[in-house]
Structure formats: structure tokens, C-alpha cells
Image: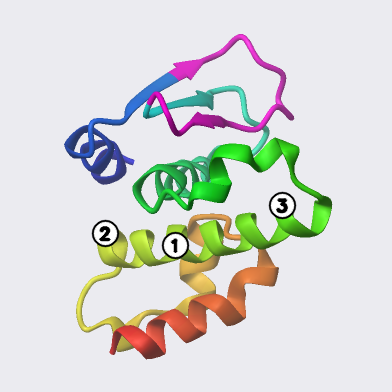
Amino acid sequence: MERLLELAKKEKIQVIWTDKLSQTTPPVVSIKQHCIIMNSNWKNHKQTIFQLAHEIAHIIYCDPTDLYLYNRTPAQKLKIESATNNRALKLMLEIYALPPITNINIINFMQDYQIPAHLESHLCSLIKNMC
């Protein structure tokens, strides 16, 4: 978590942790304000690293359509979130995967950070492209 928080600080992103939310309330980001609100009560604590990487990716890679995410159709939201998941995985690999990246155990990496199973093929593609 420290490495992601250092990246956020370097990118001038404020990360606020709150315990005032329910266990099922996901984090939220304000791209314009460079601010992320993370839920310290999240039901799966191991998943918070991936969540934080995802929210940081929204800000760092700021696709102009992200600013209007909540005014989009479900298909448009899915496309935006999918691209952001890929960017989050790339950030995580750059920060947490020890070189050489070809030695990474994808299953362990996904389990350690509770990365959703549907992102496995994206993770495999990223690793191939980073080699």
C-alpha cells in the first residue's frame, strides 16, 4: 500500500480514508480535485490495493470521458472501467512485480491483491507486453 500512496503523493493526489461507510460502499474519485476517498470498512481488505490503483489510474491517465462517467450509458461505463482496470494492473505490475516480470506467478499475484478473475487475460497480456 505504501508504494501506491507514495505514487499518489508524487502525482499530487489526495487520498482520504474513512470508516464512516458501509462494507459495500466502493471508493470514489474526483478527477478534477485529484482526490480519492477510500473505504477502510471495505468487506475485503486485500482488495483495497487494487481499488486504490484503479482510482489512481482514473486520475493519472485521465481520459476526458472519465469526467462524465456517471452520465454515461452502462456500455460506456463498462468501457471506461475496463480501460481503467487495465491501467491499474499496469501500475501494480510496475510497482509490485519484482524483475524479471516473466517470473511473476499470475495466480498468486491475483490472489494476493484480490484482482477479479475476469481480469486474468488482461493481466497476462500486460505481462507479455512488458517483457
Which numbered disc, 3 or 1, marks the residue that appears first in the sequence?
3
> What type is the residue that disc 1 sits on?
Arg
Q: Position of residue 99 (x, y in %)?
A: 20, 78
| Residue displayed at 50% across by 76% down | 123
Q: Quadrant of the N terminus?
A: top left
| Front residue of 15 and 78 | 78
Q: Callout 2: helix, strand or loop?
A: helix
- What distance separates the C-alpha of mark 2 from that of mark 1? 12 Å
| In this rendering, position of residue 24 left or right of residue 122 | right
> What type is the residue that disc 3 sits on?
Lys
Which numbered disc, 2 or 3, marks the residue that appears first in the sequence?
3
Residue 77 is marked as 3
Q: Callout 1: helix, strand or loop?
A: helix
Q: How is the image coloured?
A: rainbow
Residue 117 is marked as none
Q: Which residue is mark 2?
A: 95
Q: Which residues are magenta?
A: 17-33
| Residue displayed at 55% across by 77% down | 122
Nearest-to-viewer mark from 3 and 1: 3
Q: Which residue is mark 1?
A: 87
Q: Callout 3: helix, strand or loop?
A: helix
- Asked which quadrant contains residue 71, the reply is top right
**For residue 60, above or below residue 14:** below
Q: Position of residue 47 (x, y in %)?
A: 56, 46
**For residue 103, above or below residue 108:** below
Determine crowd level at label 2: few under 14, some 14-19, many 20+ residues with C-alpha closer than 10 A: few
